[in-house]
Amino acid sequence: MSFVGGGVGGGTDVHKFVEALQADFKTLSLETKKKYPQIKEACEEAIAKLCTAGSSQQNSVYYTVNQILYPLVQGCETKDLKIIKFCLGMMQRLITQQVVDQKGALYITNALWTLMEHNIEEVKVLQTVTLLLTTNLVVHGDTLAKALVLCFRLHYTKNPTIVNTAGATIRQLVSLVFERVYLEKDSVPSLQQQQSGATSPDGDSNSTQDGQTFATDAFHLFQDLVQLVNAEQPYWLVGITEMTRTFGLELLEAVLSNFSAVFHENQEFRLLLKERVCALVIKLFSPNVKHRQLPPPSNGTATVTTDKPYFPISMRLLRLVAILIQKYHTILVTECEIFLSLIIKFLDPDKPHWQRALALEVIHKLVTRSTLIAFFCKSYDLKNHATHIVHDMIAAMGSYVRYSLINASAVLSNGGQQLAGAAGQQPSTLTALASGGNNQCGFMFRGAYLPLVATFAPGVSKAVYLEMLDKLDAPNIPDSYGISLAYAILLDMTRSIGGVIQRTPELHPTHNTAIISEEEHKPLCLQLVNSSWSGLLSAFIPLVETSIDEGTTENILKAMQNYAALCGMLDQLQPRDAFIMAICRASFPPHYAMSIFANNVQPDADLRCHTRSGSQDLSSQFINSCNADGGDFRPQIVAVGTPLPSASLPHSVMQAPVMLTNKNLQCMRAILLLAHNNGSILGTSWHIVLQTLQHLVWILGLKPSTGGSLQAMPKPAVEANVGIQTAVMADLPVLSQMIGQLFESSQYLDDVALHHLIDALCKLSHEAMELAYANREPSLFAVAKLMETGLVNMPRIEVLWRPLTNHLLEVCQHRHIRMREWGVEAITYLVKSALQFKHKQPLKENLELQTMLLNPLSELSTVMHADVRQRQLDCVLQILNTAGEILSFGWPAIIEIIGAVNDHHGEPLIRTAFQCLQLVITDFLTVMPWRCLPLCISTAAKFGSQTQELNISLTAIGLMWNISDFFNQNQDKLMSTQLEDVSILPDFPGTVKMPQFDKLWMCLYAKLGELCVDLRPAVRKSAGQTLFSTIAAHGSLLNPPTWQALVWQVLFPLLDNVRALSSSASNEKVDASGNILIHHSRNTAQKQWAETQVLTLSGVCRVFNTKRELLQMLGDFERAWSLILEFIQNAALSKNGEVSLAALKSLQEIMYHNSTERALKDPQTAQQQDDEIWTIAWNIWLSIGMESTKMSATSRQLSSNGSATDSQEDFYIPSQAFLTALIQIFPAIFQHIQVRFSASDFDKFCTVLTNAVCIPVQTDAVPYIMSTVSDTLLTPLHDGILECMELIQKEAIRSDSNPSIRQLIPAIFRQLLIFSKFACAPPTFQQSVEHNKYGKPSGHYANNASIEVVSMNYIPFGEKSISICVKLYQSTATEESVVQEQILHDIVKALRTPLAMKYKCLSSSTWKLAISSLISVLHTGLKVARAKSQHFVSLWDDLADTLDKFLFPVSVCTIEDRGLEEIVLDETIDCQVIELLRDEVLPHAHEMPHQFIMQIVVLLNKGSIHSASDSNICYESDWKLREIFAKTCFETLLQFSLLEDQATASACNNNRLNANLLTAGAGGNVNKDFAGRLAVTALLHRFQEVLKRFNDDERQSGKCPLPRFRLSEISFVLKAIATLVVSMKKAPASKVNKPAWDLLIGLYPYLVDCTTTTSPEVSRSLREALLQYTDLLQAPRTSNDNTIQSNGQQ
């Protein structure tokens, strides 16, 4: 502290100082020695002291200083200025050298006080005081108080220089006093001790030690300052006479602003602050609070005027308050609440303009500090019973802004001259503005222009009027200063709120900020938003509406964006939405915005209840007024477009074009930025944002293009006023790009935010869809953007895929084509992109992802619209072409999509789908998972069955062939792969554990089977061929048990279906549309089905045949066998010739199949099974034969009323080919059933054969049966029938044959005989079809449909039957059954017909064959008949009759008819018959019935005389012809009658002895004799008759000769008589009885009569006859007895 003490080492310095002092004192003593001797003395004394101090080290100057000071104090007391100045200078030097102690300081102070009182050297005094206090800490307590008072006194002198110097000194010293407090660390406790003892602050403080007084000084000083400002007496600064309030406030402000730590750290100071300072401020504020700028009330008194606020004080008070709030808010919580409320009240419209400006400046200072805002909110807004300071402050700002604008326009409308300050230049400003001065900044409301007169850097408050400390009157403040400041405050407020919420540190933090803990932070932020949003919004909306330059607008919009983002971060949805809505509204003209957002929740409702009364409700005024008559200023329109149709737009708005200003576009950009930067917090507000963008995009004419981006489409210039300025045109790509970037940035959103975005887009799209239902052109914005969002979020596509595509699927079902187009475009584009995207986990291995990605594409299949389906299929085609190889799990979906087309989709769609399928099957079967193969099959089958395009169906069937090839080529791979999910393969019941590979084949076969019954013949044919080719080619791959399934579940049901459908098919003629000619064999559905029936039946039979061995091992072979035969039977009985014939061919194939598998089973069961099988076959054959040949019954039965109701199909004649085939099958069956072939079987068989032969032949079958070579050939049918007969007969006559079959021989004969009859009497149609009631000719059907029937040549057939019969008889004549059944008789009866007809036979060969057959048969049979005569009783009459009818036929024959040679030959045949009788009958006459022999004799008798032949023969030449025959007969007769060798004769004699004992038919010999005698008698009678007739005729004829044949005849008779006479003479007596001789002799007269003949030939014969009578002219040598006996016998 002591200069000297400090400089022990620096003795030289001290020495110099002392020397200097001595010199100075000397000078002073010289000065004062005349006038002031006492001073001179004192000086000298002082010099002496200094000398001693300088010489001895112990006595420093410090200890002598008080003595040294004395002369100086005395000097000051003189009035001599020169001395005073000198003394002051020396004092200052001493002070500077720090040698003055406390006492010295008091002396100096007192000396200075004196000078002050005398107004001497004031400036020097002030300097000295300053030095005294600043050099060291010696002065304190009362001395300090005195020094300060001295300065205060000087401050209030008249001299301005002194005043100013004193003012500055006071400020410096006051600061100094407080700075000292910082120096004493322990000031707080010492102060407390002292204060506890002291009753009054001005008590004696000298007792305290040095270091403890500073705080007390400061306390006292501050306390007195408050007293003084409050116009009360000071306690410590005694002697102050006057003090201005303004200066006091300034001092308080200085202390409070610079030494806040003192107050914060000391309890007393805090109390002082709380109790005194705040009270003072509040008291001083009262005039400001109470004052209103209104006329005084009528009862007002003068007090009103005295209380008028005074600018300097108000301003200083506000400064003070600002500091109190800024620096002491933590310790003055309640007080700050009051201050803040007051400041807010200052903003009321009834306060003076300057007062409001000052309040705004204070608020600005406060709001730039986020910590303060946080504190206010925490301390007030968050407390229940406190004023909501932040809320009120911001609300007041909002009101202020709106008031300023409205007031400006009101003033303008009342006359511009009222405007203070800016009034003069305002109109010109407006014109400048209107003429396009774009450098103008500010706000414009209803023509009132408020320029931006003050600009502030963000976060910096720069007060103007608060700094006007020298102004005594309120300054003139520009009108727009308030709004300019308010605008800055709002921006800073928003920034500070952001700071609080985001916890950004302040640039200049103060030490007394309230720390906010983490748990306090969240509720604080929420409250902050809650308190601020409505007020901010109510201020920002009008500001945005009225700002006229881009910069200002930009700042406000930025603030709004930031604020909205903060709300979003805090999940404060209502404020966030309100802010976003505000920006969105600003993007449109007001009326349009109102209409668009009419449905959205109005934020205004909340604003009103928060902030303002109805009178101040501006928001509506703003919206309504902005486009009202706004004076000269109109915002520039930059774009005009059509409104986007929306549900809420009234008609009027819809009609008018929408005009956008630059500001609208700026707001649009703001929205874009907000969404781009803060997409994650938008949540549900995305809807508003996107709705706005959609409207703007529409109005600006941006349309979506590929990939979802927007492009400006050139608009048709329909309306003159629709258009976009060039500048904006250049901007459009930028806007479009920004919109694009917005959606691109969605890739950075978190999942929840992304979902919000998508939800919003979907909602928007829903609205567009609703509108599109009303047939307005829809906005495709949402759909396009959904697509774009999907595309940019590919890496996490699974998050958004479902909501995204579900909505797009709804869009695809929309009835508006543009909506659908875009919906399906979006889905297909997304699916393609997603499939090609390189996902983290490769798509090929990601089952879930693949399924999910393809799902929407599959879902499109449910959409009915063809255009959508077309795009879907195009997409599939592209996917197959580009990403086919990665579709490992997606194949089922792809194939299902392809298969989802159906007939009503139209040909183009089906064609595309089919292209896809072709691609799949040709290229991708190998990469496809196993389980898709059944799907492929069924899809191919679907295309096979579609009816739109036949070629596709046929190609599809071809694809099924390809699939089968694939199965075949990849069989090893397919067999080794096992499928877990068996459900995709169909179940084939009845087969145990069918391998999956077999199931696959079965799928294929089953589907082909279904196609075989398609409605179109071509498809059926193709499918059938494919099915059977596939089975043939690849059937061997199947397991044997699977064959069972194939047969029972594919082939048999197929046959069944074909049968059912064929039977129900129509027989209407098919309309051959176009120029296609349809062959008559296919011109009805029925005929076309016939082809199918043929194909399927023959196919199944072929399979059955080729796999017979396999099928026989499988167990139910008999069932299968009987079923397939049933099918064949059904088909064979079909009324369609083609079908029936094919059925028989199949039957033939099956029957002739040679089976070799017998070795597998034991012989017995095998045999048993075989028997069953062939019995079934035989029964089927029989039923086919029976049914088909029994000429359709319906043709005979007419309906009860007699009309022919039956249709043509009911009547059917089987073809010859059919019958032939049927018959030819029999041998194959017979070889298996011959052992069991019973009589009843044969009987039925014969019925079939007989019926078959009787079936008439239709004309078109003629080529089949007509032989061109000769008529004698058999038709195939007849040939077949006879072959069957021969087959059975061979079997029957085999030596080792079964007895049961041997029994059939008689039946065989009968059947052959039936056939033989057809040679003479062919069966006619009449035989089989009875005449109908009307007696129509039999060649017609019952229903008038005429059938042309060809008469068929049955002769070869009949003849062949006869031949077979004869042969058979020759080998079986002696068989017991043949004998018993009287077969010989049957044969004779059968042959009687042709023999009796003889020349009437259709062919001469017939009777010739018949007679030769008869002869052969009799040669054999008569022997048997003789041996077993009891079985042949009935034969003889018929035999005799037959011979008679043959030898003497009714029919005549002439040379002209047959020619001579033929007739000669015929006679030879007749002779052969007679020879037969001669050789086989007559010799054995005794063994044959008497009657028969008589008939034979009569016959010979008849033949032996020529005239027995018909008298009609009238030509001579004919005579010659029967001559040989007659001769033969005659000779035979004679031989039979008379000639007998001796041996026989003797036997006869023996017999004759007993003759009387015998009856007429008893003995053979008696018979024979009788027959012989009968013959002679008959002859003689016959001769007599001829002769008599000849004689008569010749007499009558006169000169005319008789015909030659008569002459011949008589000549023959005469010769015969001669012969007879000779014979009778030679014959034994027994042979010729008496009457015979009598008769012979009786002829003689007739012979004599003949002698008159003129014919030499007759004469010759007559001569011979007469000569023979020579011997009779003498009596013969016979005894009487003999004669008598002969007579008796006769």
Image (cartoon, rainbow, N blue to C red):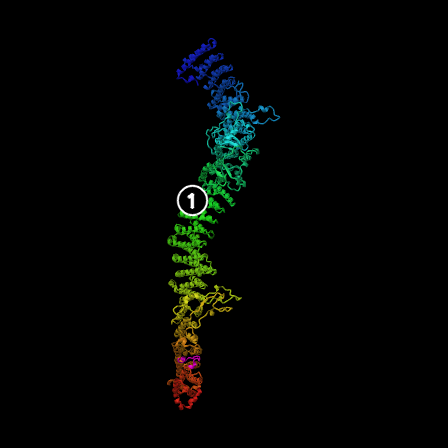
Residue 1650 vs 597, above or below: the answer is below
The residue at the far bottom in this view is: 1674
Q: Kindly identify which residue carries mark 1.
A: 833
Q: Please, is residue 672 above or below residue 309 in the view? A: below
State the image coordinates of residue 638 (x, y, percent, origin top left): 48, 36
Res. 1327 in view:
yes
At label 1, counting other C-alpha atoms closer than 10 Å, the crowd grade (few under 14, some 14-19, many 20 or more) is: some
Q: Is residue 1584 above or below residue 745?
A: below
**SS type, badge 1:** helix
Q: Residue at x 62, y 26 (%)?
A: 298
| Residue situated in front as seen by the camera: 1042 or 669 | 669
- Point out residue 1257 in the picture as x, y percentages from the top left corner: 44, 67
Residue 332 point in image, percent of width and height? 52, 28
Q: Indicate yes or no whether the magenta region holds residue 1509.
A: yes
Q: Amino acid at mark 1?
A: Ser
Q: Nearer the viewer, residue 597 or 362?
A: 597
Name the residue nearer the viewer: 890 or 405.
405
Quadrant of res 1655? bottom left
- Asked if residue 486 can be seen in this view, the reply is no
Q: Which residue of the protein is positioned furthest toward the top in this rendering? A: 34
Indicate the quadrant containing the C terminus: top left, top right, bottom left or bottom right: bottom left
Q: Nearer the viewer, residue 645 or 1158?
A: 645
Q: Is residue 592 left or right of residue 1384?
A: right
Name of the residue lying farthest toward the right: 299
- Quarter holding residue 1189: bottom left
**Residue stretch in magenta:** 1506-1520
